[in-house]
């Protein structure tokens, strides 16, 4: 906020002014009303006479204004810096044509520095309409519309009185993204991209806008944009992977690049709700948190969705009357934006299949279910890791399966039973055969001894042998 | 004992390639599924072997199929159309393996060139060769390149459905190879059927051999 305030330190009226400034204001009025209002800067890069008149007051260090929000807004303009700015050509009045010099400085209160910055974007639009259109479709603009006070407007990235040529924004030292995304920028600076960029300051290695775009910045985790951005430079990546990676195309689809190329990152699975007809993510509407409320309702224990709860949640999206079928599409990702930027040299990239495919792999311990939020960013809800290995997953997570790692546990039990029966049935049968053989042998021996006895008895006594012989 | 030629050469070639191949598929399959728990070979080698052996087995299947399609020996697979007869004969066979064999009773089934399978075998082999093996090959091909066959995979309900079917049949075959190998040792000598599967000739009692003629 403070940063934003300093950046809009423009010609704002209403400050406490002394007599000298009144004189300067009169001079400014006379100069401007004489037709020099729209003139360019004076020769030699010095401010024009008109701008000099404004700077008569606004060039005074410490000039400030207290806003309705009780913030203090600096009204001081660095004359020299402004003269070097690309905007010096249009002069102060180029952007501040709304200033009524007859009433300047005005007593009109400004609600807040933020409100002023947001309102002033309309001024930028008058000249930079193409860029503004791109910006309007960005996640940044979406957040501004949603009332996010930290979301950037034009002046947050482009200091209005010191607007530099485009090339200045494309250096690691001056790239404005890092002012808000500092942690991510630090990760980037330590990555192979950042190191290559800073080593030679060459434009070959990408800087923020090369992947995320400058004005039409999209929510990175909500689309294929980051991966597609990788493929713009690494166009032969798929062919290179196909040489050694089985099912390379499928890996490209379900594994985000940093999962392997940021070897120190932690991994997780995101199960995205997809409309099967359009293949688009289910999107949450503004003010109707349908997904979150349904997920909360399904999560009875509040400990994250278990396999059955996820299955039930999916059913709520597939009740009668719903437009098309909703399914879950899984994707292996890294856990944070900063980790996604810790890209290492390809010699350090993970190529060990076991790391992900072994049972209990760390990559599959964290699971979320998500939809696209109203601003395009994903809205996630936690799920238990068992959702990937339960028998319910055959239906609910039918499209996501990492061989070995997310295998269905009940099938392991069936395999053990099959193995046991494969060994036990022959072993049991063999044992029975052996036992019968012993038994039959014993019966035979007994029979033989009985018949021997029978034969022996008549010779010893000539006693008649019951009634059997007659039967 | 008289010798009857019951296993023609193509069938023997098919059988032994199949036997070695299925054992290899089970071992590599176990390695793929239980990587980290079992360490016979690397995951990647197991996947590549599983793929290549799988294709070899599919080609081998056609040796079996074409031989029987163009040979009168297919009669061995002709089903018994009378269910009463079939189940009565199956029950007799089951009774023999479950009890009679222990007492030394004779095998109720008498092998001949065109009736080499007992009623239980003929039923089981039809299910295996015409249902389970083709399904296993089909699901295996889909899993070999899920992206290429994504349409078919989606139609079947997703990769997990395809994989679960593949694994269930794999589980069946794990049990089957043990029991099949054991039943093969229940001839008039433990090695009789094994020898026959190499030479093609089964040894049968003279009395039954003449009766067949």
Image: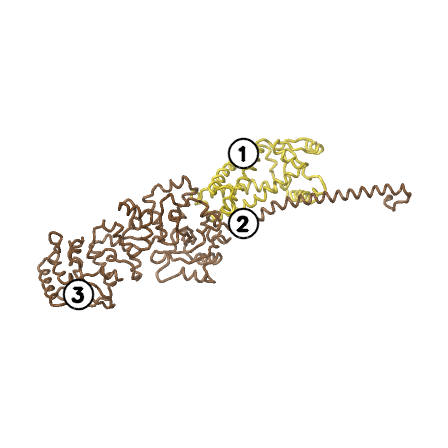
- In the rendered image, residue A58, in percent from the top left (x then y), is placed at 16, 62
Label 3, label 1: how far apart the Cα atoms are: 93 Å
Considering the numbered disc 2 on the image, is that residue within a helix, a strand or a loop?
Answer: helix
Residue A420 in percent (x, y) is at 60, 47
In the figure, what tint was chain B given? yellow
The kind of secondary structure element at disc 1 is helix
Q: Does the CB distance between marks 1 and 2 fall below 8 Å?
A: no
Chain letter for the residue marked with disc 1 in the picture: B
Residue A351, image x and y in percent? Answer: 42, 44
- Quarter of the image for residue B65 reads top right
Chain letter, colour brown: A
Chain under disc 3: A
Residue in the picture at 60% in, 38% down: B78
Same-subunit check for callouts 1 and 2 = no
To which residue does mark 3 refer?
A13
Is residue A113 toward the left or the right of residue B207 in the image?
left
Query: Helix, strand, or loop for circle 3?
Result: loop
Q: Quadrant of the N terminus of chain A?
A: bottom left
- In the picture of the structure, the residue carrying the numbered disc 1 is B63
Name the disc covering residue A412, or none.
2
């Amino acid at each position: 906020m403070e940063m934003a305030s300093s950046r809009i330190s423009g010609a704002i009226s209403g400050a406490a002014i002394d007599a000298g400034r009144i004189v300067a204001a009169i001079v400014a009025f006379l100069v401007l009303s004489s037709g020099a209002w729209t003139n360019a800067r004076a020769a030699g890069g010095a401010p024009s006479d008109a701008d000099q008149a404004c700077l008569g007051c606004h060039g005074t260090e410490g000039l400030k204004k207290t806003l309705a929000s009780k913030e203090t807004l600096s009204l001081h303009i660095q004359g020299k810096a402004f003269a070097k700015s690309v905007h010096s050509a249009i002069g102060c009045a180029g952007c501040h044509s709304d200033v009524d010099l007859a009433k300047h400085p005005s007593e009109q209160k400004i609600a807040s520095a933020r409100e002023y910055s947001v309102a002033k974007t309309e001024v930028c639009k008058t000249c930079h309409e193409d860029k503004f259109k791109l910006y309007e479709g960005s996640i940044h603009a979406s957040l501004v519309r949603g009332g996010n006070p930290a979301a950037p407007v034009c002046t947050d990235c482009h200091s209005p009185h010191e607007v530099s040529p485009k090339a200045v924004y494309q250096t690691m030292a001056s790239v404005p993204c890092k002012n808000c995304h500092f942690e991510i920028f630090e990760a980037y600076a330590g990555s192979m991209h950042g190191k290559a960029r800073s080593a030679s300051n060459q434009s070959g290695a990408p800087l923020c806008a090369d992947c995320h775009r400058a004005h039409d910045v999209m929510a990175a985790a909500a689309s294929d944009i980051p991966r597609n951005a990788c493929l713009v430079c690494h166009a032969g990546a798929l062919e290179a992977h196909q040489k050694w990676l089985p099912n390379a195309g499928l890996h490209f689809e379900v594994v985000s690049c940093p999962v392997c190329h940021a070897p120190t990152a932690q991994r997780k699975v995101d199960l995205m709700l997809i409309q099967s007809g359009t293949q688009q993510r289910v999107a949450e509407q503004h003010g109707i948190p349908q997904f979150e409320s349904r997920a909360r309702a399904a999560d009875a224990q509040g400990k994250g969705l278990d396999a059955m709860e996820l299955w039930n949640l999916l059913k709520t999206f597939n009740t009668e009357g719903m437009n098309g079928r909703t399914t879950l599409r899984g994707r292996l990702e890294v856990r944070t934006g900063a980790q996604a930027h810790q890209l290492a040299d390809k010699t350090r990239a993970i190529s060990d299949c076991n790391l992900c495919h072994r049972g209990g792999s760390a990559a599959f311990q964290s699971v979320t279910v998500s939809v696209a939020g109203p601003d395009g960013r994903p809205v996630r809800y936690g799920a238990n890791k068992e959702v990937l290995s339960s028998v319910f997953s055959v239906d609910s997570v039918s499209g996501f399966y990492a061989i070995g790692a997310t295998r269905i546990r009940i099938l392991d039990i069936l395999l053990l039973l099959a193995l046991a029966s494969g060994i036990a049935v022959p072993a049991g049968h063999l044992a029975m055969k052996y036992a019968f053989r012993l038994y039959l042998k014993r019966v035979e021996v007994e029979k033989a001894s009985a018949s021997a006895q029978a034969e022996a008895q008549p010779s010893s006594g000539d006693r008649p042998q019951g009634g059997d012989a007659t039967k | 004992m008289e010798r009857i030629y019951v296993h023609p050469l193509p069938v023997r070639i098919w059988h032994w390639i199949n036997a070695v191949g299925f054992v290899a598929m089970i071992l590599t399959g176990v390695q793929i599924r239980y990587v980290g728990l079992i360490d016979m070979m690397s995951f990647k080698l197991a996947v590549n072997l599983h793929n290549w052996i799988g294709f070899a087995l599919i080609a081998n299947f056609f040796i079996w199929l074409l031989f029987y399609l163009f040979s009168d020996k297919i009669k061995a697979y002709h089903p018994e159309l009378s269910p009463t007869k079939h189940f009565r004969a199956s029950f007799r066979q089951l009774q023999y393996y479950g009890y009679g064999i222990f007492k030394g009773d004779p095998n109720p089934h008498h092998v001949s060139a065109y009736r080499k399978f007992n009623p239980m075998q003929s039923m089981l082999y039809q299910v295996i060769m015409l249902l389970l093996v083709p399904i296993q090959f089909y699901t295996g091909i889909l899993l070999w390149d899920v992206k290429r066959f994504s349409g078919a995979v989606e139609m079947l309900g997703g990769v997990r459905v395809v994989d679960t079917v593949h694994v269930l049949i794999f589980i069946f075959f794990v049990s089957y190879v043990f029991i099949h190998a054991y039943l093969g040792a229940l001839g008039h000598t433990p090695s009789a059927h094994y020898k026959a599967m190499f030479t093609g000739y089964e040894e049968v009692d003279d009395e039954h051999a003449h009766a067949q003629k």
